[in-house]
Image: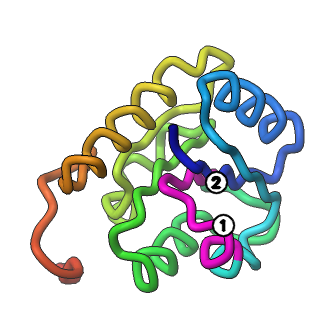
Amino acid sequence: MARILVVDDEEHIRRFYSEELADEGHKVWTTATGHELLRIIDSFQPEVVVLDIRLVDYDGLDLLQEVRNKHYDLPVILCTAYDTYKDDERSIAANYYVVKSFDLSALKVAIQKTIEASGSGQQSSLHSPPKAGPPEADF
């Protein structure tokens, strides 16, 4: 299956996601902090990143932009308890936006679709089809 990196500051969420995704056959790495994320990505080389938006030490949407700047093709799934960020223009850089729930069906579907799209050489996107090259800022 896939190498998945889960970034969430809540230990019980990291543990829950890790156990559930490992049961699906994925290799899961977790971190509570955004500060070391780019280094962890370089060493773990995940195929998918599941990123919380409201981290204690970092704004997840800012972190998403940093990931996109260095690892443009790395699929990122925003997973947050707040659906209000879905309309934030910075969230458009994510492949999927999932509202946290103890039912991980939506997250698992997003991961599966991301893996399938990556395997076929396509990049999935929640908001619009991807453009060739890095995104241009319209704002």
- Mark 1–mark 2 Cα distance, whole angstroms, equals 8 Å
The image quadrant of residue 57 is bottom right
User: Residue 32 has which mark?
Assistant: none
Give residue 95's position: percent from left, percent from top. Answer: 34, 51
The residue that appears at 84% across and 35% down in the rendered structure is 15
The residue that appears at 60% across and 24% down in the rendered structure is 24
Q: Residue furthest right?
A: 11
Q: Nearer the viewer, residue 138 or 107?
A: 107
The residue that appears at 47% across and 43% down in the rendered structure is 84
In the image, the segment drawn in magenta is: 40-52
> What residue would you read off at disc 2?
5
Residue type indicated by callout 2: Leu
> What residue would you read off at disc 1?
44
Dot 2 falls on a residue whose secondary structure is: strand
Q: Nearer the viewer, residue 66 or 56?
A: 66
Give residue 34's position: percent from left, percent from top. Answer: 72, 70
When the figure is inspected, residue 37 is found, relative to residue 16, above or below; the finding is below
The residue that appears at 17% across and 80% down in the rendered structure is 133
Dot 1 falls on a residue whose secondary structure is: helix
When the figure is inspected, residue 123 is found, relative to residue 112, above or below; the finding is below
Graded by Cα atoms within 10 Å as few (under 14), some (14 to 19) or many (20 or more), the crowding at tag 2 reads: many
Mark 1 and mark 2 residues within 8 Å of each other at the beta carbon: yes
